[in-house]
Amino acid sequence: MNFYRKIIQTSLFKIASLNSFSVVLKIGIGLITSKILAIFVGPSGMALIGNLRNFLTSLESISTLGFQNGIVKYTAENEKNKIELQKIVSTVFITLIGIGLFLSCILFFTASYWNEKIFGNNSEYLIVFKILAFVLPTYGLSIFFISVINGLGRFKKVITINIIGNIVGLLTSVFLILQFKTTGALMAIVIAPTLLFFVTLYLVQKEIQFFQFIKSDTFDFKILKNLSSYSLMTLVSSVFGPLVFLAIRNHIIQDLGIEQAGYWETITRISTYYLMFVSTILSVYFLPKLSKAQNNQETKSVFLQYYKYVLPVFVFALSLLYFIRFFVVQLLFTKEFLPVTDLFFWQLLGDILKVCALILGYQFFAQKNTSAFIITELFSFSVFYAGSLYFIKLFQIEGVVIAYAFQNACYLIVLGIYFRKSLF
């Protein structure tokens, strides 16, 4: 109990508590959206939505060059240094505008190619990529604005933006899905971030006279050089991860059918919801603790707190979820999705192994150990991809969740060996 009292007394807990409403709201909206998607687009539409989401995640990361964490850091360090802050804002803004326009042009003229890669021969979805080409520059700028506000310490404003974004996303999704079914769902995914951009721009202007900061003569290549070192870890996870998921889902569609791919997307969505809670407490409480740890003994103490108090609760919750999985699937989706219940065991086991490894993975960020992080991430993605191809041949769609559990087991073993001095 002393552990929980200590958390409650920290300023980090206040931030986490404030953020909890945003997280719960996001999960609630996600569940509502999932129900609507299940009714109006079915498993096949769910698979297409999963493909587009993975593609957008990678594209979004490329459009921001993975600068988010670096922007937060340098904005926070130079909040009172107006000249340096102006250089940072101008340099990043001009760079992201240039990158966004460049990617938009490429996407517009190669829309047919990407439509075939993401959706196969469904030419009716070509309009989605045309729209995306026009709105893409707003993606990077929206993330940039949020990162600047975050760096200035305006946490409430960041959370407000997230809440508004989730509500806007829900309303946009409901309207477009009801009007255009699967096409509407895909368009909603593309359009919602652009609507958030205008909200973010309005709130940013209240904190900083943004456009007065933008001057081409303050552009500084040194800032880009400094930011580049912070982008590598972000880009590896945010680009390669979704691409691996996309490749596996397309393999499932080709070998097993689009409905089977939709079942995998469904179990992945469910997994994403409850993992948000673990990632939140990791980022707001355990990561700062790991960063402050001065030696292996202090690091070990943080690890033990996590494994003693967080992991058992998570295991208990997932054990309960397994026994009520039939009820959960029918509640969140429809009877058409009941085959998803066959995927729960290996998915939940994989998630437990993943949560065991997450605290160790965060140690890379705490130590700013970029090379080791990239090597282990690429290893993990490779095991997942190869394992999926192998196990799918043996166990059909269940093979992909077996591969997921196998991937996280291998990742946990590798990290356990790497951080053995801090663990044992």
Image: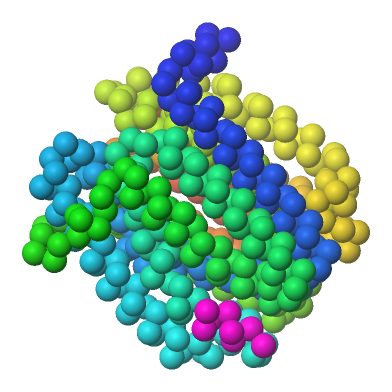
Residue at 55% x, 69% y is: 190
Most common secondary structure along the magenta stretch: helix
Farthest residue, direction right: 335
Q: Looking at this view, is 293 or 72 the one in front?
A: 72
Q: Quadrant of the C terminus?
A: top left
Residue 212, can we see it? yes
**What residue lies at 44% left-to-right and 59% top-to-bottom?**
197
From which residue to which does the magenta span run? 124-131
Q: Residue 333 in the image: x percent, y percent?
A: 82, 56
Residue positioned 25% across, 39% down in the render = 76
Residue sitting at 74 percent across and 52 percent down? Answer: 32
Q: Nearer the viewer, residue 359 or 202?
A: 202
Residue 380 x/y as whole percent:
49, 56
- The answer to whether residue 128 is magenta is yes
In the picture as drawn, the residue positioned furthest to the top comes out as 2
Where does residue 87 sit, x and y in percent of width and height? 14, 54
